[in-house]
Amino acid sequence: MARRASEMYYVDGSTVRKVAAPAPRRVEQPVRRKKAKTYRKSAVTAEKSLGFDLGYMLVLSVMLILMIVSCVVMLSVQGNVETKEKNIESLQRQLESVQADNDAFEDSLNNMYSMDDIYTIATGELGMIYSQNGQIIRYEKQEDDYVKQYSDVPKTVD
């Protein structure tokens, strides 16, 4: 066995034992007061941050009330929109019905009298006749709005 310089052996009876080395001395360091204060401050701050103070509760309450009010307003506006959409749909249905009635009345008026019926009534009951050549006199308008007649229309053109 090779001996190491750092290890010392001695013989006590039939066993060989290693000599225990002395334990290193522990150097005690003084407790720093600043760290203890800092730990206490951080502990107090942590406790305060976990709690709800008055200001936080007021802000939280105001925000909750605003959220509830905005939800109520949104629901009422949505209800008004739905009501107006239903009103628009009913008015559109009424308009379609009135237009269908109007078209039916227009068709019945157009089919009420034929051109032969109109000619018979005009010539037989009202005494009207077709115009002959030379009876139609055309006038040029001076203005776009209307023509003002001051005297009777002449029977012959000069």
Image (cartoon, grey):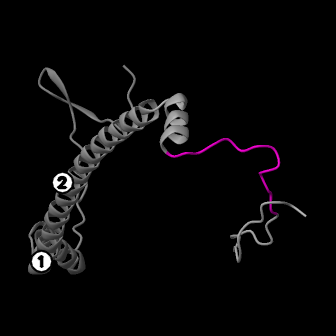
Q: Is residue 128 magenta?
A: yes
Q: Dot 1: within a 10 Å radius of its alpha carbon, few (fewer than 14), some, or many (20 or more) residues?
A: few
Residue 13 position within the rendered picture, expressed as x and y whole percent measured from the top left: 11, 24
**Residue 61 placement, left or right of 140:** left
Local secondary structure at mark 2: helix
Residue 117 position within the rendered picture, expressed as x and y whole percent measured from the top left: 49, 31
Looking at the picture, tell me which residue is in the foreground, 12 or 126.
126
Q: CA distance from mark 2 to mark 1?
A: 32 Å
In the displayed structure, 84 sits above or below 132; it is below
Q: Report the quarter where the N terminus lies.
A: top left
State the image quarter where residue 99 is shown: top left
Tag of residue 58:
1
Local secondary structure at mark 1: helix
Disc 2 target residue: 79
Residue 41 position within the rendered picture, expressed as x and y whole percent measured from the top left: 17, 77
Identified by mark 1, the residue type is Leu
Tag of residue 100:
none
Looking at the picture, tell me which residue is in the foreground, 128 or 4.
128
**Are discs 2 and 1 less than 8 Å apart at CB?**
no
Residue extent of the magenta highlight? 126-139
**Mark 2 or mark 1: whose residue is earlier in sequence:** 1
Residue positioned 77% across, 61% down in the render: 155
Residue positioned 30% across, 38% down in the render: 97
